[in-house]
Amino acid sequence: MNAGAPAPPLVTRGLGRSYGRLVALDELSLSVAAGECVALVGVNGSGKSTAVRLISGLLTPSRGSARICGCDPYREPDAGQARAATAVVPDEPLLYEDLSVRQHLELVAMAHGVSDDGLDARIDEILAGLQLAERASYLPRELSRGMRQKAQIACALIRPAALLVLDEPVVGLDPPSQTHLRELLVAAKAEGIAVLMTTHQLRFADGVADRGVVLEEGRVVDAGPWGELCERSVARGWELY
């Protein structure tokens, strides 16, 4: 890296997590540049969600390291800077039961210093795109699983971030919403945001992912440019569509 150049949004080196003799994730090394999308691919239990939780600072690693914009997500004060740079969409929506969908977006925007200028229009745009406009006043308990997922995605998109992390973002989303989410991720990349997502659906990542990493039982079994990785996956008969 050149002197004075900004640190990449995400770099991991030998990142791993074990529970006794169970290896949930073993030696994950990857980097995601600004404006790039890397997809972690694998079936349930392959280690994708463990990787996301480690990178997000929700789990501490048994070995290895992660850096988000050069900051250590496990140690303060670096961890605070890492969190500020990372927008996360978990595999299970985490919402406040007493706030409406719109109030969630307003709260996230306020917490991250988003200017009031044009905020209402931006919220309207995101809600409309995710087909949430008619449910903007709904509380989480009034929403389906898919709608709660959309609300969580909207919260991630309303705030500034150098790194956007999505764990199985299409679960519960209907095809039109999947298409729009794909468009939103492409737009985020165009703005220079790095994207890391997990999926067991190769088709969704087409046109979004630049590179892919395939995990099996916590271990990397393939990696490379997205198109080449998909060709090898199909040749091996992996049912990841």
Image (cartoon, rainbow, N blue to C red):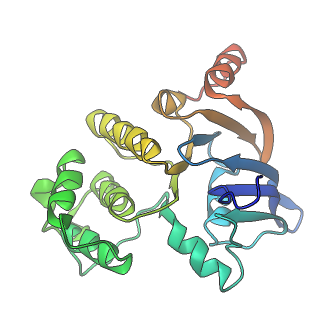
Quadrant in which residue 101 is drawn: bottom left
Q: Is residue 69 left or right of residue 146?
A: right
Residue 47's spot in the image, x, y percent? 70, 51
Q: Residue at x 22, y 46 (%)?
A: 129
Question: Considering depth in this image, is 56 or 82 the residue closer to the camera?
Answer: 82
Q: Is residue 89 left or right of residue 159?
A: right
Residue 41's spot in the image, x, y percent? 63, 38
Q: Is residue 122 left or right of residue 184?
A: left
Q: Residue at x 33, y 34 (%)?
A: 179
Residue 193's spot in the image, x, y percent? 49, 51
Q: Is residue 86 visible?
A: yes
Furthest toward the front, the residue is 3
Q: Residue at x 79, y 50 (%)?
A: 29
Q: Residue at x 10, y 55 (%)?
A: 134
Question: Considering depth in this image, is 98 or 11 the residue closer to the camera?
Answer: 11
Residue 220's spot in the image, x, y percent? 79, 41
Q: Is residue 46 visible?
A: no
Question: Considering depth in this image, is 224 or 147 the residue closer to the camera?
Answer: 224
